Image (spheres, rainbow, N blue to C red):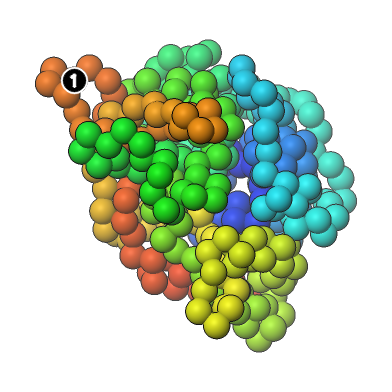
Amino acid sequence: MRRVVVDTDTGVDDALALMLLAADPEVEILAVVSVFGNTTGERAADNARYVLDTCGRTDVPVYRGADEPLVQELRMNPGIHGEDGFGNTGLRPAESVDPEPVGVSVVLDLVDRYDGEIDYLALGPQTNLAAAVEARPDLLQRLRSTTIVGTLGPALYHDTAPWEDRRFRVSRDPNVSFDIDAARIVAAHEGDVTWCGPYVTRQALVPEDFFLDIASSTGFAPAQLITAISRDYAGFYSRSYPQPEGRRVMGINDSMAVASLLYPELVTGAVMRPLETFRDPETGDRYLAGVHPVKDETRPIHRVVFDMDFDGVLDRIGEVLRRPLPWR
């Protein structure tokens, strides 16, 4: 049994990732904590509550987390996930998530209770995780593992501008650039940490019809929710990454991170690297990338995923969405 804490800025791909976790009988979701990013921290919490309720998982607690970065100005992604993170559908849970207790305090309490047993999944900016690390500098070592959706992947040898890779030409790495200070705090600490960022996730653009066909053939609520909230999301990806014959596609970024945790055999390429900060001189945005260690390296060495069995990930998503409720 895995005990998991999910830290999410619940947008479309986060919703799908939550479903993979909610459906797995070997996963105990101890808590879901919200963070700003795809939408506000408050709305991200409500969106997570809505997803879990739709999946029949009213037993999973959701808490409010960070509403803004540690230092820098607040930025979000309304053009991708909509102002509400749910494609401007206006879907809300029956009751909004209470602002108390604060998510970071919940995380710290859980780590004390389940020392060495928690797998932490950070699907949005790393603000909550960094705050927890600042409170407990040994936190990452007290987690069983930490999986983060972020970084530009492994930089080429002596690469000085990894953001120029065409896979990042649209959204690049917002989870890191939206709170670079938080990301750098996490990167500077030892632990079993895996970064699964756009370098790998942008390689998997899934046809929108994959989800539409499952929703129409099964009528199951989770699949119908994904199709309802992803119309504008798929439109963004289809404009940004034009496909032959105008086929509509969408990203499943956060599901890649969940798959790397739940199904490690689907990770087909990863390297152990220290992380280095890079700055795009045109935009001023700062990013992290895994770089080659130097002689007598002192920086923490983390795992950076650069390739996965994408068909295998999609097979597992399809199996979950075709599974009737109840999932527990």
Residue 109 percent across, percent down from the top left: 57, 23
Taking depth in this image into account, of 223 and 326 the one nearest to the observer is 223
Farthest bottom residue?
Answer: 217
> Residue drawn 27% across and 58% down?
268
Taking depth in this image into account, of 323 and 225 the one nearest to the observer is 225
Horizontal side of 296 relative to 301 (left or right) equals: left
> Residue drawn 31% across and 56% down?
307
Residue 225 percent across, percent down from the top left: 72, 66
Taking depth in this image into account, of 43 and 140 the one nearest to the observer is 43
Taking depth in this image into account, of 106 and 153 the one nearest to the observer is 153
- Residue 224 can be seen in this image: yes
- 20 lies above or below 281: below
Q: Quadrant of residue 237?
A: bottom right
Determine which residue is flagged by label 1: 297
> The residue under label 1 is which amino acid type?
Glu
Q: Quadrant of the C terminus?
A: bottom right
Horizontal side of 28 relative to 196 (left or right) equals: right
Farthest left residue?
Answer: 295
Horizontal side of 191 relative to 117 (left or right) equals: left
Disc 1: CA contacts within 10 A as few (<14), some (14-19) or many (>=20):
few
> Residue drawn 47% across and 29% down?
281
> Residue drawn 78% across and 48% down?
84
Horizontal side of 169 relative to 199 (left or right) equals: right
Residue 205 percent across, percent down from the top left: 49, 66
- 186 lies above or below 49: above
- Residue 118 can be seen in this image: no
Farthest front residue?
Answer: 282
Looking at the rendered structure, the secondary structure element under dot 1 is loop
- 229 lies above or below 208: above
